[in-house]
C-alpha cells in the first residue's frame, strides 16, 4: 500500500510538471507570435490581437468608445492607447493588464494620440495638436512633466529608439514634403534621415536600433514599406508595392518589428475593397525573399499593429480568463 501511494504521488508530480512545462512553452510561443491592432469590425475601434499566422483572434479592449494606437510597455504589463471615451477629442490612457485598471494621462481640448514608451518604461512620447499644429511631446507615466520635443508644420508617429536616446518621427516641411527625422529624447538635437516623398506613416525602430522601418512614397507604386540604416542612410525596400492595371496604387504603412527583428507587420489597402485596410506580415528581409502574409480578412479597417511582448503573458490572466475579462472570444473571419 505504501509503495502504491508513493507511486501515485510520483505520477501526479510528473503530470503536473508536464502540464506546467506545456503552459510555459505555449506562453513563450504565444509571446513571440501575437500582434495587437485596432479594428472597427464592431462599429467603433476596439483593440484585438491575432497570431502571426492569422489565427486565434481575441479581443483585448472592446469598450463603447474608440481605442486606437495601442503600444505595450517594455515589461508587457501596461498598454498605452488613445481613446475618445471622455470627450470629443482623443486622450492618452494606460491599462494595467494584470489588474484591468485603467487611468487617463491627458485631458486637453485637443487630440493626443500615438503614444510610444521609453525603453525604461518611465515616459511616454505622443503627438498632440493642443497648439493647433501636431507636435511631439513627452510626459512621465503619471501624465506629469510635459515637454514639447518638436515644432514642425505637422509632426507625427513618434517611435522611441531601443537605447532611449532618440525619437523618430515624420514631419511636414514648408516644401510640402514629409521627412523622416530623429530628435534627441531631451529635444535639444534633431537630424533628418530621409525624405518619404509623400505622407509618411509611423516609423519603427528595429530591436537592435540599427534600422528604422517607415512608409515611403514611390511614383507608380504608392506608399511602400522601406528600412533605412540609421548610420549610413542606406534605404532598402521591404514591400515591392504595385498598381493594378489602370487602377490606384497600394498604400502600405505603419510597420512594426517583431521582438526578434525577423518580421515586420504592417497595414495595407486591398484594392478590391475600398475604404478597408488589412494586416500583413513580411520577412524583414523583404518580399524579394518571401511574399507578405495577410493576417486579417474581415471587411473592416484594421490599423496600428504592435507585437505583443513576451512578458505580457507572464503578468496577464490565463488565456481562458482573457476572453471573459477583456471581451468575448471572436472567431477569425
Image: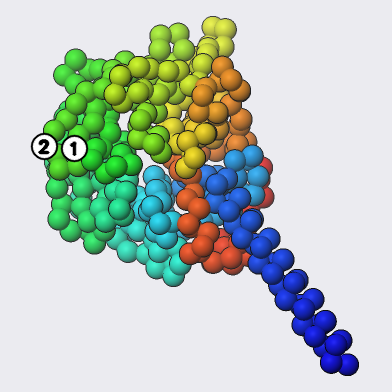
Residue 210 visible in the shown view: yes
Colour pattern of the rendering: rainbow
The one nearer the camera, 278 or 97, is: 97
Q: Secondary structure at mark 2?
A: loop
Q: Are marks 1 and 2 in contact (CB under 8 Å)?
A: yes
Residue at the front extreme of this rendering: 3
> Which quadrant holds residue 153?
top left
Q: Is residue 216 above or below residue 80?
A: above
Q: Residue at x 47, y 42 (%)?
A: 259
> Which quadrant holds residue 184?
top left
Q: Is residue 323 above or below residue 165?
A: below
Where residue 216 appears, x then y in whole percent? 38, 20
Residue at the bottom extreme of this rendering: 1
Badge 2: residue crowd in 10 Å (few <14, some 14–19, many ≥20): few
Q: Residue at x 70, y 67 (%)?
A: 19
Q: Quadrant of the N terminus?
A: bottom right
Where residue 283 appears, x then y in whole percent? 55, 28
Q: Is residue 315 above or below residue 230?
A: below
Alpha carbon separation for disc pair 1 and 2: 6 Å
Q: Is residue 301 left or right of residue 173?
A: right
Q: Report which residue position mark 2 lands on.
A: 188
Q: Secondary structure at mark 1?
A: strand
Q: Report which residue position mark 1 lands on.
A: 184
Q: Residue at x 66, y 63 (%)?
A: 21
Please tell me how many numbered marks the rendered image carries: 2
Q: Quadrant of the C terminus?
A: top right
Residue 301 visible in the shown view: no
Amino acid at each position: 500500500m505504501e509503495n502504491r501511494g508513493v507511486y501515485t504521488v510520483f505520477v501526479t508530480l510528473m503530470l503536473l510538471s508536464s502540464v506546467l512545462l506545456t503552459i510555459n512553452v505555449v506562453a513563450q510561443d504565444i509571446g513571440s507570435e501575437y500582434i495587437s491592432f485596432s479594428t472597427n469590425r464592431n462599429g467603433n475601434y476596439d483593440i484585438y490581437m491575432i497570431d502571426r499566422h492569422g489565427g486565434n483572434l481575441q479581443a483585448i479592449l472592446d469598450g463603447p468608445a474608440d481605442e486606437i494606437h495601442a503600444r505595450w510597455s517594455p515589461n508587457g504589463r501596461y498598454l498605452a492607447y488613445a481613446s475618445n471615451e471622455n470627450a470629443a477629442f482623443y486622450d492618452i490612457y494606460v491599462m494595467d493588464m494584470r489588474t484591468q485598471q485603467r487611468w487617463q494621462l491627458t485631458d486637453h481640448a485637443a487630440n493626443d494620440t500615438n503614444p510610444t514608451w521609453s525603453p525604461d518604461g518611465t515616459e511616454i512620447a505622443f503627438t498632440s495638436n493642443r497648439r493647433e499644429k501636431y507636435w511631439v511631446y513627452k510626459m512621465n507615466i503619471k501624465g506629469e512633466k510635459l515637454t514639447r520635443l518638436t515644432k514642425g508644420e505637422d509632426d507625427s508617429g513618434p517611435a522611441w529608439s531601443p537605447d532611449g536616446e532618440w525619437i523618430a518621427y515624420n514631419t511636414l516641411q514648408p516644401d510640402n514634403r514629409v521627412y523622416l527625422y530623429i530628435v534627441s529624447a531631451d529635444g535639444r538635437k534633431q537630424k533628418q534621415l530621409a525624405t518619404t516623398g509623400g505622407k509618411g506613416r509611423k516609423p519603427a525602430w528595429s530591436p537592435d536600433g540599427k534600422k528604422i522601418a517607415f512608409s515611403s512614397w514611390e511614383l507608380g507604386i504608392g506608399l511602400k514599406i522601406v528600412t533605412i540604416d540609421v548610420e549610413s542612410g542606406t534605404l532598402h525596400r521591404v514591400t515591392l508595392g504595385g498598381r493594378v492595371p489602370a487602377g490606384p496604387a497600394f498604400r502600405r504603412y505603419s510597420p512594426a518589428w517583431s521582438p526578434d527583428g525577423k518580421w515586420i507587420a504592417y497595414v495595407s489597402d486591398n484594392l478590391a475593397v475600398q475604404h478597408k485596410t488589412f494586416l500583413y506580415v513580411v520577412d524583414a528581409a523583404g518580399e524579394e525573399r518571401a511574399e507578405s502574409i495577410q493576417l486579417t480578412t474581415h471587411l473592416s479597417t484594421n490599423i496600428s499593429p504592435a507585437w505583443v511582448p513576451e512578458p505580457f503573458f507572464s503578468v496577464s490572466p490565463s488565456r481562458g480568463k482573457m476572453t471573459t475579462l477583456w471581451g468575448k472570444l471572436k472567431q477569425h473571419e
